[in-house]
Image (cartoon, helix red, strand yellow):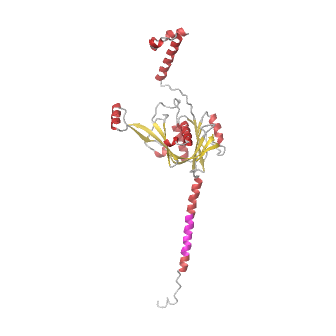
Amino acid sequence: SEEEVSNNLPENETSEEEDEGLTKAERDARILAARKTREEEKDNLVKYQNKQRVLVFSSRGVTSRFRHLNEDFRTLLVHSKKENKHDTKKNLYEINDLCEMNGCNNCIFFEARKSKDLYLWVTKAPNGPSAKFLVSNIHTMEELRLTGNCLKGSRPILSFDKAFDSSPHMQILKQLFTSAFGTPKGHPKSKPFVDHIMNFSVADGRIWFRHFQIVDSTQDKKEIRRAAKEGKETVSLVEIGPRFVLSLVKIFNGGFGGQVLYENPKYVKPNTIRSEANKRKGKAYAQRKAAEKRRDVRRQKNYIPKDPLGDVFK
């Protein structure tokens, strides 16, 4: 009963000034709330409210480099879930059902084409929006072997270029990246530390991804104040990896399809690039054959007939 609760509570839970004008039930409720708050702060308990889960998997036909990049994503994103490789490459909207069955409201899907090209889908499942990127300049953590390191499960800081606030389609991409790459506060697998940063920069019309460790050179408050007076930084960044470059293809209204909200006018298909390279090689071959023909014609024009008296004085 309320009388038993009030009798079991210590007298110093609230001050006498706060108790004035309150009924006994209100005072007991306030004391219980204060005690619960202190217990949560003592145990470092954080409510898991923003329940963002991301499904990370790939299609069949990925190379070893693509597969290692997929594993790096799963390692960095503790709020991610695994799934078997997706067989079909046509009906990608079926992935929305996979996200729903796994309880995920975000999806990062690697689509491999011809074992040469890698496309990245970042989707807010199942209703969208979704963005499709061409991934290039891939370097995985195993390949780079950089000196940076961070605690597995720690929450990252997401750093975005100011260009992400310049246009509506860039704001959509920023929201998609925040939902997919940002570890929710209070996630059961996350650690209460912030020791690494994910950077999304925009240059040459593409998005450059870098991952750094936050390193403190000192923890002494006196040295930190001294460095602040001298204008020096006690915090530095050491790259961890992976690193890659994203070229935006399209932004869709739904999950893995739907109405096209934005199409990148500067995007060039990899097949077109390879076709142009082959044409240049073909032109070089044609130019070499034309030079051979011109040389044969020149030899025929400059032909010196044989002298009938050339062998007389031998």
Q: Is residue 200 visible?
A: no
Q: Nearer the viewer, residue 130 or 5?
A: 130
Q: Does residue 228 appear anywhere in the picture? A: yes
Q: Position of residue 149 (x, y in %)?
A: 44, 39
| x then y, percent, for residue 127 | 63, 37
> Which SS does the magenta portion mostly show?
helix
> Is residue 290 depicted above or below 120 in this figure?
below
Q: Looking at the image, which residue is at 33% across and 31% down?
A: 222
- Stretch in magenta: 283-296
Towards the viewer: 85 or 302: 302
Name the residue at 44% across, 43% down. Answer: 146
Q: Is residue 290 inside the magenta stretch?
A: yes
Residue 114 percent coordinates (x, y)? 60, 51
Quarter of the view holding residue 195? top left
- How many numbered marks does the figure carry? 0
Residue at 52 percent across and 13 percent down: it is 26
Tell whether 35 sits left or right of 124: left
- Is 191 left, or right, of 84 in this rendering? left
In the depicted structure, whether residue 61 falls above or below residue 302? above
Q: Please state which of residues 174 and 117 is positioned toward the viewer in this rendering.
A: 174
Drawn side of residue 270 relative to residue 223, left or right = right
Nearest the camera: 29 or 189?
29
Residue 124 location, quadrant: top right
Residue ID at (56%, 61%):
280
Looking at the rendering, in which quadrant would you find the N terminus?
top right
Q: Position of residue 267 (x, y in %)?
A: 57, 50
- Quarter of the figure with residue 180: top right
Residue 113 among those drawn in magenta: no
